[in-house]
Image (cartoon, rainbow, N blue to C red):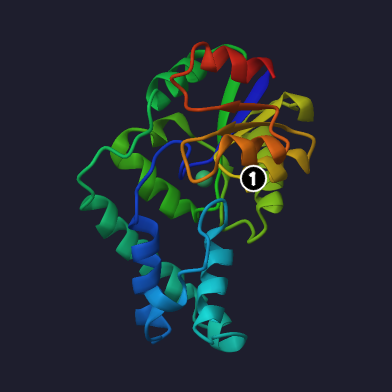
Amino acid sequence: MKLVLWDIDGTLLLLRGVGRRSAVAAVAEVLKADQVDERTRSVDFAGSTDGRIFRAMAAACGIVGDAYESNLPALRARYLELLAGEVAAFRDDPVLPAVPSVLARMAEHAEVRLGLLTGNYEPGARIKLTPFGLMEFFRVGGFGDDSEDRREVAAAAFGRSSVHHGIEFRRSDVIVVGDTEHDIDCALAHGFRAVGVCTGRRTRERLTSAGAHLVLDNLTEPDALERILEI
Ligand SMILES: [Mg+2]
């Protein structure tokens, strides 16, 4: 039995600019910071976790320690509100090629179980996936609420999925699919298998050198599902 754990941004869909705009507006409002967009340009969202992103954005605006920690619950809440508004206003189709068909085939596969492994806060994951019909494939996962450290999010995803599906998955039967070196890293740290997809902001070379067992340009590649399950 295989457990396939999916990243969201850059892997299942691409909501260009939505996450950053929501985060910048939330930091500006809740932390009362100026020029947030300019000051946080160097904060890389790809493969990070929501908690780590907010900590880095606040630090870039000179807000650290208790001034940050005490405002984090309000920051998280306001971000999620803004995110919901941004996603509702998103007019393009953000779902990446062949994602719904691959997920549907995996969901029906007798030897496969699905989960999420994302740096998004859990409500943020729902906000991003539900309008596009992708949340129905996932009943369990690890999220940015579990930790700022993606390796710990991976551990949470594994533990929770094992309980939810009632299966003691072998670590070598756990497959992480993601678009950054951080997805690959958190898989390898636990003895999981890692699939890189070049649909986000990273090159094939970068995902390969991070140690991915398989790198796909995207999920329309021939036999993508079979190749993912075989690694
Ligand atoms: Mg990603």
Side of 41 relative to 182 (left or right): left
Q: Residue at x 31, y 64 (%)?
A: 82
Rendered position, 68 above or below 225: below
Residues 182 and 205: in front is: 205
- Tell me the SS state at disc 1: helix
Q: Residue at x 70, y 41 (%)?
A: 210
Residue at mark 1: 181
Q: Quadrant of the C terminus?
A: top right
**How far from the left and from the top, in percent, is residue 218?**
47, 27
> Can residue 50 be seen?
yes
Rendered position, 164 above or below 222: below
Rendered position, 73 above or below 194: below
**How far from the left and from the top, in percent, is residue 110?**
57, 11
> Can residue 170 be seen?
no
Side of 189 relative to 44 (left or right): right
Rendered position, 129 above or below 110: below
Specify few, some or many for label 1: CA neighbours under 10 Å numbering under 14, 14-19, or 20 or more. many
Residues 173 and 10: in front is: 10
Q: Amino acid at mark 1?
A: Glu
Residues 139 and 54: in front is: 54
Q: Residue at x 45, y 78 (%)?
A: 39
